[in-house]
Image (cartoon, helix red, strand yellow):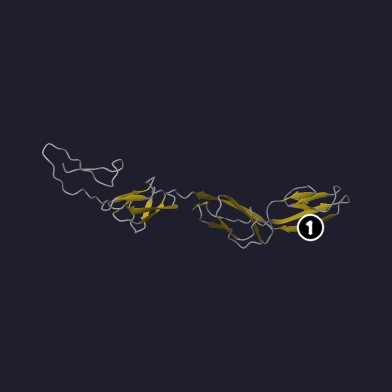
Amino acid sequence: VNINSGFGSNYTFLWNTLSTAENIIVSNSGIYSVEVTDENGCLASDSISVILNPYPIVNLGIDKTICEGDSTSFNAVGNWQWIEWNDLSLQQVLKVKTKGIYTVTVTDLNGCKGTDSAELILNQNPTVSLGDDIEFCKGESVTIKTIPNDFASYLWQDGSVGQTFTTFTPEVITLLATDVNGCEGTDTVVLKILPELEINLPPDQQFCEGDNYTISVPGLNPSNHEFSWST
């Protein structure tokens, strides 16, 4: 604060700070007085009380981390005369979901300003893959696992929590996986039973010793079927 004596340079000055300058600059609260002497030796004095208001302290708290698609908020707690964020928002509580640094400037009742910043960190949701839909034979079991298979936790559609899921029935399998950051990803795979094979061999046959007889399975293509005979 610059305190002006109000007199010109043809006067002498003595402040209670021991300064003899015409004007003084002060940075602390207090009472400041000056004695002024003119060229005739006449003396006058005056004093002024200076109150320096402290800068307001606004605290947005620690940096925050959220998952993709979530949101959170920063709160400029306090009784402020004016609030302005770096995105030009004017409310006390700022809801955010985009990564970046958020800065708020507040003005108190004395017109003094304070500022604070906090960063919002955004973690991507994990990619969960159960693979393609599966067709399998009746009576067989199918074990489903994620690719990759290193999540922090697993929750399958039936409430089980193992890394893998085994079933004998056709159904829709859904997994909710959570990574080490607490972010979630999901995927679904459909299991279907293949139609049962129907095998009809020819009627019993008689043939003479030394002859050959070829037995074939009608309706099945050898190029995409495997056969296991009893002989």
Looking at the image, the residue that sits furthest to the front is: 208
Compare residues 215 and 74 and report the one nearer the observer. Answer: 215
Left or right of 204 on screen, residue 91: right
In the depicted structure, whether residue 136 falls above or below residue 213: below
Residue 226, position in %: x, y? 26, 42
Compare residues 40 and 202 and report the one nearer the observer. Answer: 202
Residue 102, position in %: x, y? 59, 52
Viewer can see residue 30? yes
Q: Quadrant of residue 167?
A: bottom left
Q: Amino acid at mark 1?
A: Asp
Disc 1 element: strand
Looking at the image, the residue that sits furthest to the left is: 209
Residue 162, position in %: x, y? 32, 52
What residue is disc 1 on?
46
Compare residues 106 and 41 and report the one nearer the observer. Answer: 106
Looking at the image, the residue that sits furthest to the bottom is: 79
Left or right of 61 on screen, residue 6: right
